[in-house]
Amino acid sequence: MTQRSRDARREAARARDRNAKRNRWLLPVAGAFIVVVAAVGAILLSGGGSSGGASVRPSGDLASPGASAVGGNAVIAGQPLVAFADPANDAAIGQTIPTVTSPTASIALDGRAKVLLFVAHWCPHCQREVPLIQAWINAGGLPADVDLVTISTGIDPGRPNYPPEAWLAREGWTPPVIVDSTNEVASAYGLSAYPFFVFVNADGTVHERLSGELPTADLAARISQLGR
Amino acid sequence: MSVDTVELFYGILALVAFAAVIGLVGLRLLAFASDGAASAFERVAEAIAPNAIGIAWVVAVLATAGSLYFSEIAGFEPCRLCWYQRIAMYPLVVVLTVAAYRRERAGAVYAGALAAIGAVIAAYHVALEWIPALDTGACDPDNPCTLIWFRVFGFISLPTLALAAFLLILTVLSIRPREVVEDHPVTRRDP
């Protein structure tokens, strides 16, 4: 390296030092300004720090998760199904379902084939599935001799999209809904994930259980295989 | 101050962070094509580079404080991917504190590696929120990663906040004026 290039580098270093000294307070002041503006903006946008604003969040009391929802108090009778794990080797297939009686809807051994759909209001997969199934129902997809019963479970006022009744109403949901405010119905049917389907033959035995999103074409195909 | 207000506060900071990242990266790319942009980037880099660890430290502290607020005070239970992002974010505060105290530029390398890992996980988490089918197609009954606690301005969720913080830290730590690179102890070649 030549003397000239060394001098040039030293001069560049001195210039950087001068700039650094000049800018010493610039960035901290700018950072503090941004934080203050963000705080003031947040307070103004949220209406004084009390509610709403541009943020989309669940309503409800965060301090009381699992609180009872309207229409709870389901009564369960019969042998519960084992926890669902492997759809290819489900021990619950052929077992008679437990019955459920609730103020809003029931699951009875009434000689009709059924699809039981367990949904959680905060689950994005359920949020995607519900409108698809409702559109399928509206298009006449559900056979007249098959009942579709919804079980609203996993209810938590601290989680998004609460309350589930409002969500289902927004979606124009027409099937009857059992409100499982204590998750006992879900447990009795061996629920492992949301959404959860239980296909029930007309004789009240389990034909199949599935978890996860199910395209309506697959739903229709499975219903067509039910014993009626 | 309500939870909504804190969400908005961090949402605004995330907007600023994204704007800064886009601006800095954009200017850096323009610098390849334009002498004017190269000169502007050089000036910005000279202002940022000596303070990069301090800026990144502030971002990491704010992100960590927000993470703890949302889980411990707001009651938003962290999911599995949230924990992975925490594993990347929380040590950044310590690494950057030590690097700033010891004035070790090398700390930026370690912090940058953590921020890069966190950014990848946060990006996947954000993608999962918009495309839940990327996951198993079902919600874990306890605490699925697809659960969206809030969205500020329609798109800034918790992992989006983390992504903004990781990207800003990564961007700031990676900016160096040309002279600084040449003067770096590792790259310096004396005759």
Image (cartoon, coloured by chain):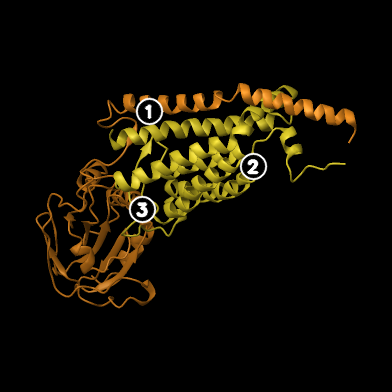
Residue occupying image coordinates x 15% and y 50%: A69
- Pointer 3: what residue? A125
Please name the amino acid that badge 2 sits on. Answer: Arg
Helix, strand or loop at mark 3:
helix
- Quote the CA–CA distance across marks 3 and 1: 34 Å
Total count of labels: 3
- The reply, left or right, for residue B136 in relation to residue A167 is right
Residue B102, image x, y percentages = 59, 43
In what quadrant of the picture does the N terminus of chain B appear?
Answer: top left
Residue B47, image x, y percentages = 63, 27
Residue B186, image x, y percentages = 74, 46
For label 2, count other residues whose C-alpha is less than 10 Å away and answer few (under 14), some (14-19) or many (20+). Answer: some
The disc placed on residue B105 is 2
Q: Which quadrant of the figure has residue A224?
A: bottom left
The disc placed on residue A39 is 1
The mark closer to the camera, 3 or 2, is 2
The mark closer to the camera, 3 or 1, is 1
- Chain identity of mark 3: A
Colour displayed for chain A in the image of the structure: orange
Helix, strand or loop at mark 1:
helix
- Quote the CA–CA distance across marks 1 and 2: 31 Å
Residue B67, compared with residue B145, is above or below; it is above
- Judged from this view, the residue extending furthest toward the right is A2
- The reply, left or right, for residue A189 in relation to residue B13 is left
- The reply, left or right, for residue A111 in relation to residue B73 is left
Residue occupying image coordinates x 25% and y 47%: A158
Residue A92, image x, y percentages = 27, 75
Please name the amino acid that badge 3 sits on. Answer: His
- Write down which chain is painted yellow: B
